[in-house]
Amino acid sequence: MRIRVEHRTQLEYSADVFESVMDARLGPRTDEHQRWISFDLRVEPVAAVRRYNDGFGNAAHLITVARPHHAIDIVTRGEIETTLADPFQPPRERPTALAPGDIADYLDPSPLVLRADELAAMAEPVRAEPAFDAAQKLMHLVNERFEYRPDVTGVETSVGEVLTHSSGVCQDLAHVLIGLCRAIGIPARYVSGYILAGPDRDAPKRGAAASHAWVEAFTPTHGWRGFDPTNDLLASEHHVKMAVGRDYHDVPPTRGTFRGVADEVLAVAVSTQAVAAPASSGR
Amino acid sequence: MTAEPRSASVPAYAPDGFWDEMFEAPGQVRTHYVDLARRLATLGASDVAKRQRAAELSFQAQGITFSVNQDPSGPEKTMPFDLIPRIVLAEEWARIERGLEQRVRALNLFLHDIYHEQRILRTDLIPAELVLGARGYRREFRNVDVPRDVYTHVVGSDLVRDGAGTWYVLEDNLRVPSGVSYLVENRRVLKRVWPQIFADYRVRPVEGYPQDLLDVLRAVAPGTDDPTVVLLTPGVHNSAFFEHAFLAKTMGIDLVQGSDLFVDDAAVYMRTTRGRRRVHVIYRRVDDDFLDPLAFRSDSLLGVPGMLATSRMGRVTLANAIGTGVADDKAIYAYVPTIIKYYLGEDEILPNVKTYIADDPTERAYILEHIAELVVKSVNESGGYGMLIGPHAPVADHEEYRARIQANPRGYIAQPTLALSRHPTWSRDHLEGRHVDLRPFILFGRDVKVTPGGLTRVALRSGSLVVNSSQGGGAKDTWVLEGTC
Amino acid sequence: MLSRVADDLYWVARYVERGIAVSRLVDVTRHLELDAGSEDFWAPLVGAIDLASDDVRYYLTSDTMNPDSLVSCVRSARTLARGIREAIASEMWEELNTLYGSLATPTTARAVRGEGVSFARLVRERLQAFQGLAEATLAREEEWQFLEIGKFVERADDVARVLNRQSHLLAATGGSAEPGGSDVVRWLAVLRSCGSAEAYARYYSLRVEPVRLLEFLLLNPVFPQSVRFSLASACAALDAVAALRSAAGNDPGPAVRTLGRARAQVELTAIDEVFDRGLEPFLTNIQVLIAQASDELSATFLRDEPIPGRLVGVARATMIMAAQQQQQ
């Protein structure tokens, strides 16, 4: 499926600030499930933008505005070809085992997903099952037991607090699912990205107006597969990935500092639409 | 130099069964100390005491101080300095140099591997969890091409001698090893208060260290002919501030704090009266955790937002590189001989002290059972903190450490209590034996350079094995003699 | 040179000069105390309204709650100097450090409890030694220039403030009336608090008149304590660093202009005009310009902020932007 995305991040300040430094994880990302065809990042006012790769292999952008300004507007536009039509289908070749570094990253506790007895207890019933089935069951579990509520948690809420409230946004539900997977030995990572909005029955219900978060779990049979606990779906061609990490802390879409004394207001808008692939030129 | 045994003209001095740096046996001075012993004998107690005081005053007047007890707002102390230098023979030093160079090269290859393909972790030579779970492991710095592939530009490895006189490496310090300013100042002060003793010996100079360090820093600059190098300090409240200021001054570079720097267009700049100025190399005495509030601790005011990204892009060089702390971990230290073998295909020239890793169940059991005989150390602490010296500690402390080890086994290692060598040290009005160690400094830029000497640290309290200045230790000048090669 | 170091040098110089000025005030109050009926005069002179004489002495010398007391000035200067030892000669640092150390000793405590004058003299002498060492040992480069700017900005400000506090007294008798005995004592006190009594006498002999006094302390071009001399010296030093900044391609900023405006006031106004306009508004305007120039100086040279004229409140604060919570 071909998907067009526009992601707008707007920051407004109550007074002039200067020396803004922003670190962005807005893509592009190309892997076995998607190919990012075009990517454009623009900033108002004119800013210095440098692209680099972070320690997790994500594309990152360092955006700086030194002179005084009272707003920053970042817009990314992209076109992505997603290729995973059937996530249930195992890949043709048996997946290679994860390297020790990846195992450590995705199995060990991370800044926002710490070990919790409650998670271990919750996941225990499915420990004996094949990993791919277990991951699905855990995803259903999170979807059923946790309520989607946007005003309970914050940017750096850890998984312990989410457990207490039994509610959160997609970021939080993803953290819980990661914690559950890791508790029974399934390497799990956080995916920051987009989900296609759409009227048809199979398209996801939530996540289209802002950036979305779900989980990828690594199983011996299927390799990395996405599990979206907010929508109770396996990630497929409707999901577009921006970046992956241990949890949200590694891959916030934007994170920054500025110098000055001002209040800040953040507004985010995302739009996604499926587009027709260009006609092939005949083969 | 004669080899006559010293008589009672050197005040009766008892090695007490320890390896003594100066005395082969009671009344028998080692050959290379004979001239020094003669000087000591002719001087008399009050003369020595007078020079000792002159040295102390010299340090005080210059304010060569540090903060005690890791309390920066507390009193400043001058480093207690002992007049009697420690002398190392040229041949002995040559071997130490070779061993340290081997070690630093191997550790550097290890770090490069850990932060790239991680080949060693696919073998079973070292538990992957030990490395990847180390507090100093910085996954944020993976897959960066550092200039000249050098991660560890400055290393301070601590050496000790045991009861048989064998040299061991006690630990490696790869994050922000300190003490080199005392090294240079000790020599200067000794020359000033007791120049005569230098007449009998050909001592290799140490004052070239700042220039050597500057050469290293310039050599790793990102492509430019005339790099701007700065020293990043946490500020006046840091216990090692004097050293930061000293090094910056002797190298002729700016001493900066985090707030003096900012990142724009993926380059680091410093604020000057004439406007911004690009910085190419930062000798940073700020720990990784505090370097960049966007990448690491967000509450840090000591760092610079965007520093990590900029250094990933190769647009600024940090010395030492981010992530060297993983090799600072005392549990990793235990594997250094393995590391030397794996990357260099050689046996280690300088041996490690036998180390038990509490993270391993079998070794943990041994530690818990024999804790009264062992020295237990926290894997990430320095300065002599987080350390238990079993034979010297009360039983209550043994129990406390047993509990700590069981609560956090990954956090502790233990080593047998070595009978550290001793050196005659001036105590009030006569010489007494005190335990010493040695911290040489190793620079790595274009090539590896070991400073001829190092800081000989002295445990000033009788019988104490703790040499760290923050815990009341002192220092001696260290002489490496010019050799005939 | 690092902006922070320049900032600290500027403020060290200001605190040192301020300490000298305060020490003179202590002298003056001591002399005035001995005259009956002068409380209504000297208390305002030192800006300590409603305090008894002992309290005033304490306020000026040792009150740590008073940021301008002798003890506070010395402490502030020493604290800043400690962080920039590499920029000043070691003798200069040792001067401040030794003085600071002696503040806590019993001898000093006795001196303060006593008359306070000997303590004030001790402090003044050590601070003047600091200035003397700077003059003798620092090359005339940026370090020296920022010390000069700080010293003279502070001096101009202090003298203007002392004059302003007595403006009602000086203006009332401006020009004509015969001085009364107690008036002369008070005018002499004003001169002494600026260390200028003897110098004045050499110019005008013993005729102490408000007009001449003001002319001397405000407009004299060659007397080092006059506001005009101080502003001219500060401007010269500021021009020197501004030239370096321009040469490096950066705007020197409004501080040069603002300080220049203050200097123009005292260079181009005759003493009659000063009285015509009103002494107090004139002096207040000078002080306002000095304060503004100081802020602009900080913003441009010392904080390297992009728009020098705009003060951004907290110099070194950074704020973490809201990272986007993934909402849906």
Image (cartoon, coloured by chain):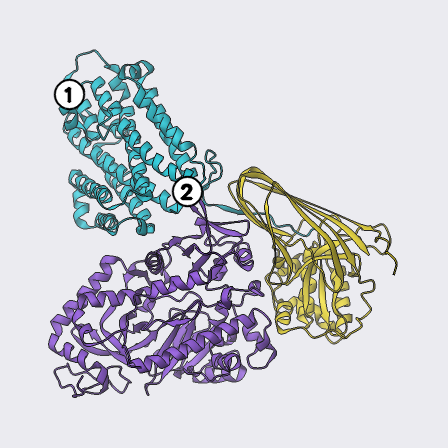
Q: Which chain is cyan?
A: C
Q: Colour of chain A?
A: yellow
Left or right of residue A164, residue B173 in this image: left
Image coordinates of residue C174 in percent, x first then y, are 24, 14
Chain bearing mark 1 = C
Q: Who's the residue at 30% across and 23% down the image?
A: C266
Which residue was labeled with disc 2? B274
- Number of disc labels: 2
Report if residue A204 is visible in the image: no
Image coordinates of residue B113 in percent, x first then y, are 55, 72
- Depth check, front residue: B291 or C34: B291
Density class for disc 1 (Cα within 10 Å; few <14, some 14-19, many ≥20) is: some
Discs 2/1, front: 2
Q: Colour of chain B?
A: purple
> Which of the 4 image quadrants contains residue B6?
bottom left
Image quadrant occupied by the N terminus of chain B: bottom left
In the image, farthest residue toward the front: B225
Q: Who's the residue at 86% across and 54% down the image?
A: A279
Q: Who's the residue at 30% across and 80% down the image?
A: B90
In the image, is residue B57 above or below residue A10?
below
Looking at numbered disc 1 in the image, what kind of residue is underneath it? Tyr
> Which of the 4 image quadrants contains residue A241?
bottom right
In the image, farthest residue toward the right: A282
Find the distance from the CA under tag 2 to the CA under tag 1.
45 Å
In the image, is residue C188 above or below residue B9?
above
Q: Secondary structure at mark 2?
A: loop
Looking at numbered disc 2 in the image, what kind of residue is underneath it? Arg
Which residue was labeled with disc 1? C204
Image coordinates of residue A228 in percent, x first then y, are 75, 60
Chain bearing mark 2 = B
Q: Who's the residue at 16% across and 45% down the image?
A: C110
